[in-house]
Amino acid sequence: MKQKLIISFIILSYFLTEDSSLNYLWPTNTSKTITTLFGEKRSRRFHAGIDVRTYGRIGDKIFAVESGYISRIKISPDGYGKALYLTLDDGNIILYAHIDRYNSEIELLVNKLRINKKSSSLNHFLKKDELRVQKGELLGYCGDTGSLSGPHLHFEIRDPSGHPINPLKNFYSIVDTLRPIAESLAIIPLSNKTYINGLQKYNLFDIEPLIVNNDNNSYKYFIKDTISVIGKFGLGLETHDEINSSPFDFGIYEIELFIDNQKQYKINFDKYCFDHDHLIYNELDYYLLEKESRSFHRLFLNENTELDFIDRDSNEGITLDKGYHNLIINVIDNFDNSIQIQGVLKGDIVLSPDIIYDNNNYLIQTSNTNNNLSFYLSTRYENSQKIIPNYKQLDSTLFSFDKPLKPYEVLEIFNKDKGIKSKSTYISFYDYDPYKISGTFELEHINRYININFKENEFSGFNAKLILSGNGKKNIIDLNRYSKNVLSSGLIELNRFEDINQISIIYDTNPEIIFNKNLYGKIFSSEQESSFKFKNFEIISNKESFNFDSFISIHEDQIDIPKEFIKISNPIIISPNTISFKDYITLKYENKKLIKGGIYQLNEEKEKWIFKGKINSFGQAEIKLFSGGIFCILDEEEKPLIKNIFPNPNSYYNVKEVDKINFNILDVHSKIDYDSIEINLNNQPIYFDYIPYRDLLRADLFNELDSGENTLKISIKDNIGNKTNKEIRFFIK
């Protein structure tokens, strides 16, 4: 089963028909293969258009899809790079992005504007009568400028008000006879009284094909488990679309949710508003993205959800009546290929604990009469192997076991009721040394609640409690064994974290074993600005930071820093990572004695520190955060590199051979400070394009050089402030 990672640039191919244009001319001659669809997810935004594949080429032509006028020219080192906006006579706006170069007329205009503004960056608006173009006219050439991972054409259609609209639903058609694919269903707790199969946790369920035709194109799917739910919950769906002759995955167009034939939710990606980009994690479940690196569409509304592609009658969470309920989900692609997912949910009532036990006598007693129990044994060396032990049922609630022949680590007991798996209970048959117990804390933000996990280094077999301490108060919470090596608190109300400064795990050993962790945090309001200080760091929220009140903690930790860096502060950990921000929070650092350095974040997967923001002359740095993580103030002294310069130093050229200047610039750690780049040719400033993807800087020369000696001066800085100067001479014959 294929997984789709939202942040990766994935190449998805689908083929347009030769007569595919319903209204407009196809925008390029590069190909009729699309790599990304409208509405697909990017980091903190939705994809506002389609990407057309260039197969790694630069220089394929870009055309006007209809008659109109050039209304805007924008150039920047990131984002869209070199972009062109074409306002059509019908009022719609066309955007072409990542352009390598414009046609000669536009390039001359750009050079003039750059000289007048004394800047390589540009954001220039034109009037209707300044630069008219006709349908099919050459506008420029495909490239790889801006923020991207390879050459392609990003193409958008916006309505007269500037809102992006789906090009494939309204203007172009493709050959697509394949249906979407269903992968997994998530059941999401929305209250601290919600239990899904007996647990206060996200639960994931596989979705399997029910009917498959000869083309292996499934159109009906089912969830094989009946799912027990108590309390308010939401649904999430992992799904993708497929296209003829393409091995790749991409986003869907529409999802509908029905329970007992009543519509609960609908979403379709016809259009959206850029102002709603920051609400992406009201549609996409951030918890599962962070924890599982998987993309699930939320099939319920969050508070303050404003996304205009979601039906306003959609649910804000579901509570089932007692009994069985039919679940149907329809998934539809851009060309009306569809699938249907069917399942059964059971509305249950709150039950007393399923299992009580006397570990010394190897007796298991159930809290109610139940003849449908399953028992499994496993050892630390056979974690994947389940062995059904011999047992005797003494009466309707009591079971006995012979002492295992091996030192079995854990007995797992599952209570089944008409196919519904409830909470498992783990019982130790092994003698443990209490003083060898160790583990780590993990905080999770699950909607409006906090869950605390304690992950043991190995299964202990002991019961434990969680204690929240601070301001002379103690909150004691029973821990459940969520899995063999994980103790979980379940969902805790935020108000129980007010004024706490320590969390503890206390095992019921004799004497008691205690693990303590300092915890400094604050409950941030979703409706007002707030701040929290920790040493030289400060977390600041605004009125739009959160969907709901949220808890954020911060503490120092001992983490090794690579020798190429100079450590200025101890690393700090901001948690939980699983908060779904509505907008962002600000992390601020201030040390008036500091004049150089920056905020770095640790990429734990790549074990690499990533530059996020520089220290200014006042000893301050600020960055926007959309998740927690590990941060540190670092400095480094390695200067940026300048190499592969053209024209070559001390070389001779004919005048026609030098119509451009280009070279590579590289900085491994803090990257290049774009605003610091200066290029002078014969003491005159040269305005350039910077292409970070290739570490390339280039500049076109619009006037022929005079014969004789020419002097090129280059000056660049990295974001920390390390500077490199280069001066070369070359000659024109």
Image: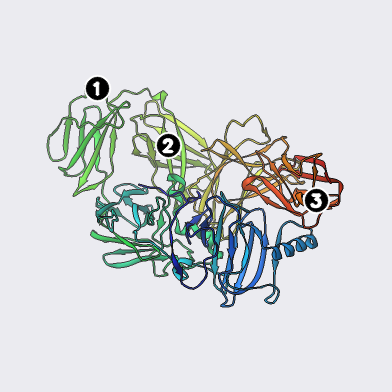
Point out residue 341 in the picture as x, y percentages from the top left corner. 29, 58
Q: Please indicate, yes or no, whether residue 721 appears anywhere in the rendered image.
A: yes
Q: Nearer the viewer, mark 3 or mark 1?
A: 3
Identify the disc placed on residue 454. 2
Left or right of 428, for residue 246: right
Element marked by disc 1: loop
Q: Residue at x 25, y 32 (%)?
A: 386
Q: CA distance from mark 3 to mark 2?
A: 71 Å
Q: Residue at x 62, y 31 (%)?
A: 562
On screen, residue 57 above or below 456: below
Q: CA distance from mark 3 to mark 1?
A: 87 Å
> At label 3, which amino acid type do we have?
Val
Left or right of 246, for residue 38: right
Q: CA distance from mark 2 to mark 1?
A: 28 Å
Q: Which numbered disc flags the more N-terminal residue, 2 or 1?
A: 1
Which residue position holds label 1? 406
> At label 2, which amino acid type do we have?
Phe
Q: Residue at x 46, y 37 (%)?
A: 441
Q: Which numbered disc flags the more N-terminal residue, 3 or 1?
A: 1
Identify the disc placed on residue 655. 3
Q: Nearer the viewer, residue 504 or 448?
A: 448
- Tell me if mark 3 has few (under 14), some (14-19) or many (20+) residues whose alpha carbon lies within 10 angstroms of its own: some
Left or right of 298, for residue 50: right
> At label 1, which amino acid type do we have?
Lys
